[in-house]
Amino acid sequence: MYRFLVVIEKANNNYSAYSPDLPGCVATGVTREDAEKNMYEAIEMHIHGLIEDNLPIPESKSFAEYVAIAEKYGSEQTA
C-alpha cells in the first residue's frame, strides 16, 4: 500500500488538490469531496503509469501539522 499526503485548498470557485511527494499530480473539484475523490483517482493513475514505465514509486516524505497561535497575538500591533 502507498500513502501520500494530499493538500486540498479552497480556490475561487472550486477546490484544488496536490501531493508534495508526487510533483505534477494535481486535481480539482467543485466541492472538497470532489477534489479529494479526483485526487485519489489521479494518484492511482499516476502510480499505475510509473509502474508501467518501470519507474520508481516516490517514497512519501511529507507530513502536515497544524500550528495553533493564541488569538491575542492576532489583534496586537507592534510599533
Image (spheres, helix red, strand yellow):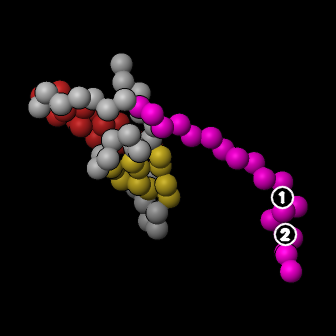
**Element under disc 1:** helix
In the image, residue 77 lies in the stretch drawn in magenta: yes
The residue at the point 41 percent across, 54 percent down is 16
Q: Which residues are magenta?
A: 60-79
**Which residue is farthest left?**
53
The residue at the point 46 percent across, 68 percent down is 12
The CA span between labels 1 and 2 is 7 Å
Pick the front one: 42 or 34:
42
Q: Return the mark for residue 63.
A: none
**Element under disc 2:** helix
- How far across and down, in percent of the image, does residue 69 sit? 78, 53
Q: Is residue 35 visible?
A: no
The residue at the point 29 percent across, 50 percent down is 24
Q: Looking at the picture, does residue 62 appear above or below residue 14?
A: above
Q: Quadrant of the C terminus?
A: bottom right
10 Å crowding of disc 1: few (<14), some (14-19), many (20+): few
What is the three-letter code of the residue carrying label 1?
Glu
Q: Is residue 74 left or right of residue 38?
A: right
- For the residues labelled 1 and 2, say whether their Cβ atoms are less than 8 Å apart: yes
Instruction: Quickly name the residue at label 2.
Output: 75
Q: Quadrant of the N terminus?
A: top left
Pick the front one: 48 or 40:
48
**Magenta segment, principal secondary structure?**
loop
Q: Return the mark for residue 71.
A: 1
- How far across and down, in percent of the image, does residue 27 sit? 33, 50
